[in-house]
């Protein structure tokens, strides 16, 4: 595997793969009651947390219209998230089967709120409602795929030397940073975060910078699906700034980055110090809605490392 | 010595392996080696050569070419030219070539073993019985993967031109680990052996010629760190595979960041060797000999940190001291030695300095009463006790025959001590009880 690459990589795109955008519909807003404000916080150690810095970022849709605000995360928030991830030793010690149960539960709770998540996608990306519904459907299906694999992506037994067996066991990398693609705000989030936690990692997620609300809406799903606190931590804000903090952090064991060429270079360069495992897209983009590109065991392989255990037997 | 005396002492004399054929090989090349590029032996553009030394005697073995940027360009260009045909020739054809390489090395296995011992200083028993047989197995194994790639790995393809940089501790074995899987999958390679141990790689190049491996599939360029750095930075190299120090690994990571070059790094270790009180101590002692004195301790996954349960610590230390006393050190070609020479002068200095630091930091030094031979680069088997977990010698990789011992009371403490390292390469656990594992 070290001397080959997946053929599918040849079909990745040079620019992000996005669904067609509808023009803004310029109906004037008449006077009406103001809606109840929903403040979007961050999600650290199973709790919603206000940003350390006390700043927020305005998020517009693809036509430039105001959608809302998210917390502007900073270095301190990332450090808190890393600590929370390390404090959680529940998730990694669960069996693949138990993790699958939690993943199915996530899918179940997302399915109940399908319309809400689809509407959110339309609101942020101005894609058609039908495309948005499909993105949610695909997200649910993708969670199923990894739930299915959670107790099946398994190790090997090698017959190495006389009176020895070698168990090659895939283990979680530990605490991982997951920097999500900007495009496909929900499916991109699901396609990266779910495989990473499937293998038992605890993650610090930086969701789509342009369209973060699918991720922030997801807190409530995590909270109601028996996901242990600290398994998924979400910090919103400037993608590359936060990603660099993660890459430099000595207590982060691995990092995935989906974004620009420049960002990929930074990740690899800054990860050298503590020898993090990195997986970056080198500025090549997957079509997340295409199963051959957006999912598969290769994600689990990058979310795990093999420990070889040599066991002597007999006399 | 009289037979009666031998019965008394149970000692035995030297049993030297003949170096004749290896010397013949060096003489055939007039003790001067060029670079192996595109299936031909070419003189280095730099016109510079450096010496390869036999560390057991400090005698000069041969002159080795110093490849510069022009040579690296030439080698990478040759590998790139050879790539399309080699990738398309199909798994079965490649399997046949790998099989031929395995067979040809097997035919000349003793020549490889002797040459490796001469060049590296490792005991002939090791090269003959371990290194070279493993090399051969590797080529057979990957001949198998070449055969299977088109069916078992059909969703995958070759990466392209691979730059490979290998260390001096297992020169030919590292070459096999790097070259066999790479060419099996349809890649072409440029390999740089370590500057102190180039000879078996050059003999391997001759083997490639002999079996008629297509030109440019395997290119061997010799030289120092700068040659390696040039290879790392070459824009037509699609992957770098490196085994060596953590420090250089980090440099390579930074140099290739963002280029899309795939990277395999195999770096250092400071691996714990955990002994519980119920373990069979005599087996443990032999385990320790293999863990830290095998190959003069110059092993990335050497069991260099002995963690022993307090209740048996003194008893085990005593047994180790007795065993150290009976280890034999000497010329690598002597079949009756346990420990050979350190690879070169600079590594000997690294070991000597770190041991001095261990003494200065207050750990207790233990070495056998006998003295090492004077004519080569030798270092005696060494053990430190009373070492604190934060001592330099407990944290830094020494890459020499130096064992660092400390004790623990509970399983929990053992695990904590074992994990108290920035490395995480290997670990062994010695116990008769499965529950301890």
Image: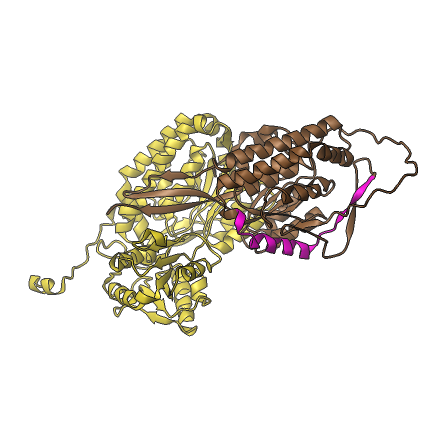
Chain colours: A brown, B yellow
Question: What range of the chain is rendered magenta?
Answer: A66-91
Residue B380 spot, x, y in % from top left: 31, 64
- Say which residue appears at 30% left-offset and 52% top-offset: B118
Q: State how many labels appear.
A: 0
B326 shown above or below A237: below
Relative horizontal placement of residue A3, taking residue B101 as reference (left or right): right
Up-down: is A5 above or below B243?
A: above
Q: Tell me where residue B365 sits by quadrant.
A: bottom left
Q: Would residue A83 be counted in the magenta stretch? A: yes
B132 or A186, which lies in front? A186
Residue B54 image position (x, y, % from top left) = 33, 55
Taking depth in this image into account, of B29 and A72 the one nearest to the observer is A72
Which of A228 and A201 lies nearest the eye of the viewer? A228
* Outermost residue to the right: A31
Occupied quadrant, residue B347: bottom left
Q: Is residue A288 visible?
A: no
Where on the picture, by quarter, is residue B334? Answer: bottom left
Where residue B161 sits: x, y (%)?
51, 37
Residue drawn at the location 28% of the way across and 50% of the way down: B126
The answer to whether one can see residue A87 in this image is yes
């Amino acid at each position: 595997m070290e001397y080959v690459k997946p053929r599918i990589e040849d079909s990745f795109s040079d620019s992000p793969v996005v669904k067609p955008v509808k023009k803004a519909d310029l109906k004037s807003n008449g006077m009406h009651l103001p809606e109840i404000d929903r403040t979007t916080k961050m999600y650290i150690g199973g709790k919603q947390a206000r940003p350390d810095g006390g700043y927020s970022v305005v998020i517009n849709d693809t036509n430039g219209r105001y959608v809302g605000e998210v917390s502007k995360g900073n270095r301190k928030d990332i450090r808190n998230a890393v600590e929370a991830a390390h404090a959680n030793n529940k998730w990694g010690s669960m069996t693949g089967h138990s993790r699958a149960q939690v993943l199915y539960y996530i899918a179940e709770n997302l399915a109940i709120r399908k319309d809400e998540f689809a509407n959110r996608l339309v609101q942020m990306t101005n894609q058609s409602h039908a495309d948005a519904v499909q993105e949610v459907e695909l997200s649910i299906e993708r969670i199923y795929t990894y739930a299915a694999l959670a107790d099946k992506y398994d190790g090997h037994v090698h017959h190495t030397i006389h009176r020895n067996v070698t168990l090659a066991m895939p283990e979680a990398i530990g605490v991982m940073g997951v920097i999500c693609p900007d495009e496909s705000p929900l499916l991109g989030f699901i396609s990266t975060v779910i495989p990473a936690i499937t293998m038992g990692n605890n993650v610090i997620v930086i969701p789509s910078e342009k369209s973060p609300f699918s991720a922030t809406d997801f807190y409530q799903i995590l909270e109601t699906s028996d996901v242990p606190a600290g398994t998924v931590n979400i910090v919103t804000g400037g993608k590359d700034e936060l990603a660099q903090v993660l890459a430099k952090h000595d207590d982060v064991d691995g990092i995935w980055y989906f974004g620009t060429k420049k960002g990929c270079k930074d990740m690899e360069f800054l990860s050298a110090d503590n020898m993090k495992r990195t997986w970056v897209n080198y500025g090549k983009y997957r079509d997340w809605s295409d199963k051959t590109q957006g999912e598969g065991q290769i994600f689990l392989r990058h979310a795990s490392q093999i420990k070889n255990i040599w066991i002597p037997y007999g006399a | 010595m009289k037979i009666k005396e031998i019965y008394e002492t149970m000692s035995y004399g030297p049993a030297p392996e003949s170096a004749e054929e290896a010397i013949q090989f060096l003489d055939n090349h007039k003790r001067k080696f060029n670079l192996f590029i595109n299936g031909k032996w070419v003189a280095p553009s730099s016109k510079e050569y450096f010496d390869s030394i036999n560390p057991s005697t400090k005698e000069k073995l041969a002159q080795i070419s110093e490849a510069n940027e022009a040579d690296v360009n030439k080698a990478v260009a040759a590998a790139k030219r050879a790539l399309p045909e080699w990738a398309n020739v199909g798994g079965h054809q490649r399997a046949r070539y790998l099989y031929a390489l395995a067979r040809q090395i097997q035919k000349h296995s003793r020549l490889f073993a002797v040459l490796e011992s001469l060049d590296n200083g490792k005991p002939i028993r090791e090269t003959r019985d371990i290194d070279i047989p493993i090399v051969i197995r590797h080529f057979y194994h990957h001949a198998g993967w070449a055969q299977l790639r088109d069916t078992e790995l059909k969703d995958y393809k070759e990466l392209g031109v691979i730059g490979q940089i290998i260390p001096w501790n297992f020169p030919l074995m590292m070459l096999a680990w790097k070259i066999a899987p790479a060419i099996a999958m349809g890649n072409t390679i440029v390999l740089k052996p370590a500057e102190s141990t180039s000879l078996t790689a050059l003999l391997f190049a001759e083997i490639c010629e002999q079996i008629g491996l297509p030109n440019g599939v395997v290119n061997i360029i010799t030289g120092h760190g700068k040659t390696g750095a040039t290879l790392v930075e070459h824009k037509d190299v699609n992957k770098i595979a490196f085994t060596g120090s953590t420090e250089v690994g980090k440099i390579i990571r930074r140099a290739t960041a963002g280029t899309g070059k795939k990277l395999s790094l195999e770096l250092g270790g400071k691996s714990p060797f955990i002994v519980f009180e119920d373990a069979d101590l005599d087996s443990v002692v032999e385990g320790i000999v293999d863990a830290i004195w095998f190959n003069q301790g110059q092993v990335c996954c050497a069991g260099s940190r002995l963690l022993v349960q307090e209740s048996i610590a003194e008893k085990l230390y005593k047994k180790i001291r007795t065993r150290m006393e009976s280890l034999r050190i000497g010329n690598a070609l002597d079949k009756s030695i346990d420990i050979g020479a350190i690879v070169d002068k600079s590594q000997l200095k690294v070991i000597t300095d770190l041991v001095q630091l261990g003494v200065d930091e207050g750990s207790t030094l233990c070495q056998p009463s006998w003295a090492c031979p004077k004519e080569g680069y030798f270092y005696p088997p060494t053990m430190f006790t009373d070492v604190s977990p934060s001592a330099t010698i407990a944290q830094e990789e020494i890459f020499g025959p130096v064992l660092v011992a400390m004790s623990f009371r509970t399983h929990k403490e053992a695990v904590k001590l074992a994990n108290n390292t920035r490395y995480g390469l290997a670990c062994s656990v010695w116990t008769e009880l499965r529950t301890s594992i």
